[in-house]
Image: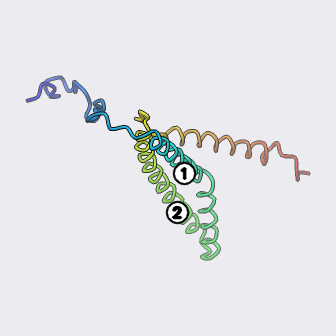
Amino acid sequence: MAGNDPTETGGLFIGRRPGTAPLRYRGKPATGSPVRRRLDALLAGAILVVEALLLTTIWGPQPAGWLWIGSHVFHATGSVTFGILVAFVGMLTTIFSTIAIAMRLDRVWKLVRRASGHEQKKGALEPMVVTSMVIAGSAFLLWFLIIHGPGNLVGKG
């Protein structure tokens, strides 16, 4: 039996958790020509732009589009519940699909970035999602509290 068996160590696993070992590359890959590496860097930048544009749709256009579709379903069926259900299910489906596509793009971005000569171990997806969330939340609060909210004096009185 292994020396790190939980029954021998009081229920504690001693050692490294599975999947947390350091990355070991087979060997240093052949580097491309400077022109090839520059083209790979440009391609990596283009992939990052597409990923950023894709992620921006999560916070505005997708929910607004599904609310519009839900309102049309409500007017066609006369059922508020069915309209909300269609909007909610559609919104979740497209947002999760968008995130899945963005994850695939992020993996491709890491590979292309490595091909361009950079030591890229982490993707850009997480910082991009957090940054876009902060920007979208700040823009919403600005609109809600200042532009359209209690600070708006246009049309009152």
As rendered, which of 130 and 39 lies closer to the eye? 39
Image x and y of residue 3, in percent: 12, 24
* Residue found 47% across the figure and 57% down from its top: 97
Corner quadrant of residue 26: top left
Where disc 2 sits, the SS reads: helix
> Mark 2 packing: few (<14 Cα in 10 Å), some, or many (20+)?
some
As rendered, which of 2 and 155 lies closer to the eye? 2
The quadrant of the picture occupied by the N terminus is top left
Task: Reply above or below: 49 against 28.
Answer: below
* Residue found 60% across the figure and 72% down from its top: 73
Residue 73 located left or right of residue 150: left
Image x and y of residue 137, in percent: 64, 42
Image x and y of residue 82, in percent: 55, 69
**Rounded to the nearest whole Å, what is the CA distance between mark 2 and mark 1?**
23 Å
Marks 2,1: beta carbons within 8 A:
no
Where disc 1 sits, the SS reads: helix
According to the image, label 1 marks what residue?
50
Residue at the far right: name it: 157
* Residue found 32% across the figure and 37% down from its top: 29
Residue 60 located left or right of residue 28: right
Residue 114 located left or right of residue 47: left
Give the amino acid at mark 2.
Gly
According to the image, label 2 marks what residue?
90
As rendered, which of 144 and 106 lies closer to the eye? 106
The tag on residue 76 is: none
First in sequence: mark 2 or mark 1? 1
